[in-house]
Image (cartoon, grey):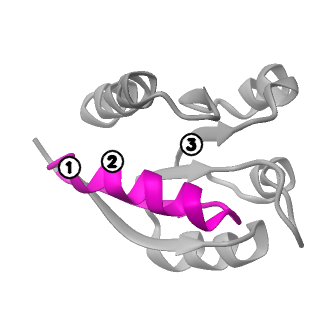
Amino acid sequence: MEVMSAIIVDDEPLALELLSNILSEIYNIEVACHCHNGREAIGKITEIRPDLVFLDIEMPKMDGISMLKALSPLPQVILVTSHDEYAVESYEYDVTDFVKKPISTARFLKAVEKANKRFNTD
């Protein structure tokens, strides 16, 4: 199985740490970098061209939905947020999945598996 490159975009240090720790146990995902807001993430996504982005919605400077609107083409995106009111809107951007905070490891891994399936069929 091919390795997917990923970027984590979240302004909460504990969320970044938790996601990094979970992803470090997954052999076919390599986290290229962490970003703390949408503006920073757009630059890194354009530079690195990751296969997958783990994205929070409510962040300073540029929120996740604005970031989705600004990027084309989009890599696969898994939204990881406590704001479930954005779930319906997020699917307009063909996100791979939506994981609600606080994160359940089992639910998060299910989202990652979905991303793996999409990655390996494209």
Mark 3, residues whose alpha carbon is within 10 Å: few (<14), some, or many (≥20)?
A: many
Q: Which of 102 and 121 is in front in this view?
A: 102
Residue 14 in the image: above or below residue 117: below
What separation in Å lies between label 2 and label 1 (alpha carbons)? 6 Å
Q: In which quarter of the image is residue 80?
A: top right
Is residue 30 found left or right of 118 in the rendered image? left
- Residue at numbered disc 3: 77
User: Disc 3 on helix, strand or loop?
Assistant: strand
Q: Residue at left 52%, top 52%?
A: 53
SS of the residue under disc 1: loop
Q: Disc 1 marks which residue?
A: 25
The three-letter amino acid code for the residue at tag 3 is Val
Q: Earlier in the sequence, mark 3 or mark 2?
A: 2
Q: In this view, does 49 lie above or below 86?
A: below
Mark 3–mark 1 distance (CA, rounded to whole Å) = 19 Å
Residue under label 2 = 22
Q: Where is residue 99 in the image (x, y as percent from the top left)?
A: 59, 29
**Residue 75 vertical placement versus 115 (above, below):** below
**Amino acid type at mark 2:** Ile
Segment colored magenta: 3-27
Give the quadrant of residue 101.
Answer: top right
